[in-house]
Image: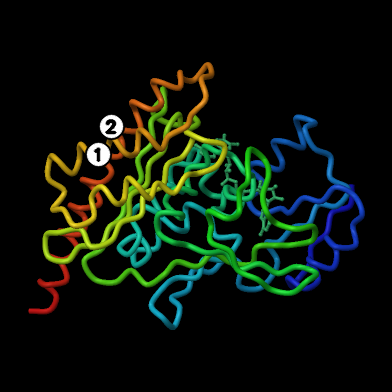
Amino acid sequence: MRYHRPESFEDAVAIAAGSGGTTRFLAGGTDVLVQLRAGLVTPDDLIDLKHIPGVAEIVRTADGGWRIGIAVTGAQMGRHADLVRDWPGVVEGMQLVGSTQVQGRATPVGNLCNGSPAADSVPGLVAAGARVDILGPGGPRSLAVEEVPTGPGRTTLRPGEIITAITLPPRGAQAGDAYLRFTPRTEMDIAVVGVAVNLRLDGERIAAARIALGAVAPTVLLADAAAAAIIGTPLDDAALTALATAATAAANPISDKRGTADFRKEITGVLVRRAARIAYDRVQARTGIQQGEDK
Ligand SMILES: Cc1cc2nc3c(=O)[nH]c(=O)nc-3n(C[C@H](O)[C@H](O)[C@H](O)COP(=O)(O)OP(=O)(O)OC[C@H]3O[C@@H](n4cnc5c(N)ncnc54)[C@H](O)[C@@H]3O)c2cc1C
């Protein structure tokens, strides 16, 4: 195995494109190194991306959104007060990954590219409308986060392509998000179901919504019908019931030792109601703070 430490994305792409064998990128290594030690993968080329300038930075973009570098860890995201204020659901998804030790290494890009249907940071990113910037032998391109995974362990990234950053759109006024997961244990466990809700309000009514479901299909699902069930409503009981029904119908889980398909569908309905309520309450709390600051 050859270990590489490029200092630019262009160099990293050139190494990956010229590999001819099995390639892995090293961000936090909390998936790759575990797979390596277990003998699940033996890369011919292991390309460490952490020494490329700027990859560990979280930067406000010109449009008021965020650019998250590919070596930014869950711990860093949790310490970034402005990011947490804008996107609490995105951050809490990443912060559920592993333990304190894992948090110090694990990145959302690694979580996405590992391709697990239960990846905890991915539903929040999908609900947020996050995108990834990509560089490859064919040049740069950009994809919505939901376009990256295609199934367990598989992505749409082409040979030699590297994600160079995650971008989050501007938060805007009257908006909030939330992520909840169910695990049999309180931590260090994989989501049996994960649900992210991102809302924008106009007064008391929901003007826009994006809802993403994790661990209930081969990839994270963007549940448009569930979002439609609450748009135009003040998230009253009828809307919450319609939301749960639509999300449950969208879920297409498997049965395994962690839970039956029926159990996963039921939990999807429970979590989506709770996550929507939290996101809605966050909008109101955030709006209250902004009004207070304006005085
Ligand atoms: C003890 C433990 C507990 C865990 N708990 C959870 C959990 O609760 N929830 C959860 O979702 N996950 C969990 N994980 C899995 C893992 O920590 C996460 O998936 C983590 O976010 C992976 O990020 P990383 O930076 O360590 O990725 P790495 O291991 O560095 O890379 C993962 C994959 O992404 C690819 N990759 C990395 N960077 C790029 C890039 N820029 N462009 C293209 N491809 C890239 C690599 O080639 C590799 O295939 C756990 C792992 C451990 C060891």
On the image, numbered disc 1 is attached to which residue? 273
Q: Residue 275 vs residue 22: left or right?
A: left
Front residue of 32/177: it is 177
Residue 189, compared with residue 240, is above or below; it is above
Q: How many numbered markers are drawn?
A: 2
Report crowding for label 1: few under 14, some 14 to 19, many 20 or more residues within 10 A (C-alpha): many
Q: What color scheme is it?
A: rainbow
Instruction: Give percent across and percent down for residue 203.
Output: 12, 65
| Amino acid type, callout 1 | Arg
Question: Residue, x 56% and y 53% (percent of image)?
Answer: 107
Residue 244, compared with residue 223, is above or below; it is above
Instruction: Give percent across and percent down for residue 109.
Output: 59, 55
Front residue of 80/143: it is 143
| Amino acid type, callout 2 | Val
Question: Residue, x 34% and y 67% (percent of image)?
Answer: 82
- For the residues labelled 2 and 1, say whether their Cβ atoms are less than 8 Å apart: yes
